[in-house]
Amino acid sequence: MTITITIPKLTLPDGLAGTVRLLLPIVEPVALAFAGACGVGIPLQLGLGFGFKLARRALRG
């Protein structure tokens, strides 16, 4: 028995920058929660948070 899941083609505006801008609010909390659940430590979590903040800032303008 085979289960097939089809994902509709996504059409996103603004190319790569628009895609990252759209996905960043979804990816950020998931990445930080995953890092915390794995016990990677506070410095790495702060670094991830800082990196996401820089990405948001770069994509804003």
Image (cartoon, rainbow, N blue to C red):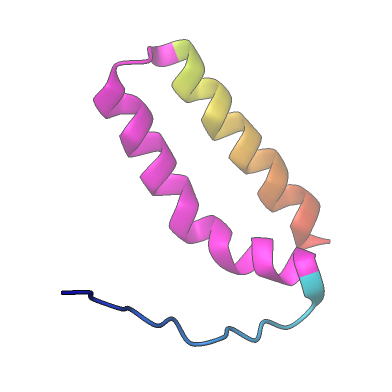
| Nearer to the camera, 50 or 33 | 33
| Nearer to the camera, 9 or 59 | 9
Q: Is residue 16 found left or right of 50 in the rendered image?
A: right
46 is higher (above) or lower (below) than 33? above
| Nearer to the camera, 46 or 40 | 40
28 is higher (above) or lower (below) than 41? below
Q: Residue furthest right?
A: 61
32 is higher (above) or lower (below) than 39? below
Q: Residue furthest front?
A: 1
- Place residue 11 in its image quadrant: bottom right
Going 73% across and 49% down the picture, which residue do you hit? 57
| Nearer to the camera, 5 or 59 | 5
State which quarter of the image contains the C terminus.
bottom right
Going 56% across and 86% down the picture, which residue do you hit? 9
Q: Is residue 38 found left or right of 52 in the rendered image?
A: left
Asked if residue 47 lies in the magenta stretch, the reply is: no
Going 32% across and 37% down the picture, which residue do you hit? 33
Image coords of residue 8 (percent x, y): 48, 87
Image coords of residue 36 (percent x, y): 31, 26
Q: Is residue 40 found left or right of 57 in the rendered image?
A: left
State which quarter of the image contains the N terminus.
bottom left
**Number of residue marks:** 0
Image coords of residue 10 (percent x, y): 58, 83
Q: Residue furthest left?
A: 1
- Place residue 37 in its image quadrant: top left
Going 60% across and 41% down the picture, which residue do you hit? 52
Asked if residue 36 lies in the magenta stretch, the reply is: yes
- Place residue 41 in its image quadrant: top left
Looking at the rendering, the stretch of residues picked out in magenta corresponds to 16-42
Chief SS of the magenta region: helix
